[in-house]
Amino acid sequence: MKTTIRTTVDDLVSALRKAVLARADERAARLADQATHNRKPARDGNRRP
């Protein structure tokens, strides 16, 4: 039982860590785009004004 719980917790922590890193990469890409083009990204992140 403890092994199952530990595995589940490890899986959840791993998934959360991946999600946080993916979000950080996304933010870094937006900031780099803003700095490169001297403009702010659109609010939805997909369209340009």
Image (tube, rainbow, N blue to C red):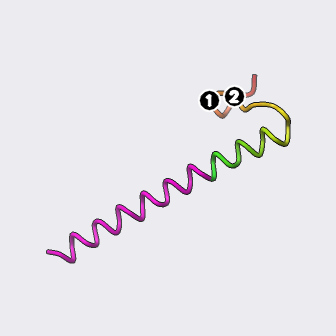
Identity of the residue drawn at 78% across and 38% down: 34
Q: Name the residue under label 2.
A: 42
Residue 29: give its label.
Answer: none
Q: Is residue 10 above or below residue 34?
A: below
Quadrant of the rendering where the C terminus is positioned: top right
Considering every residue shown, the one lying at the far right of the view is 37
> Is residue 26 a member of the stretch shown in magenta?
no
Q: Where is residue 28 in the image (x, y as percent from the top left)?
A: 68, 49
Q: Magenta part mainly helix, strand or loop?
A: helix
Considering every residue shown, the one lying at the far bottom of the view is 3
Three-letter code for the amino acid on which mark 2 is drawn: Ala
Identify the magenta region. Answer: 1-24
Quadrant of the rendering where the N terminus is positioned: bottom left
Identity of the residue drawn at 35% across and 66% down: 11
Label 2: state its secondary structure. Answer: loop
Q: Position of residue 30 (x, y in %)?
A: 70, 42
Q: In which quarter of the image is residue 31?
A: top right
Q: Where is residue 41 in the image (x, y as percent from the top left)?
A: 72, 32
> Is residue 13 a member of the stretch shown in magenta?
yes
Could you classify mark 2 by the number of other residues whose Cα lies within 10 Å: few (under 14), some (14-19), or many (20 or more)? Answer: few
Q: How many marks?
A: 2
Q: Do the residues labelled 1 and 2 touch (CB within 8 Å)?
A: yes
Q: Name the residue under label 1.
A: 44
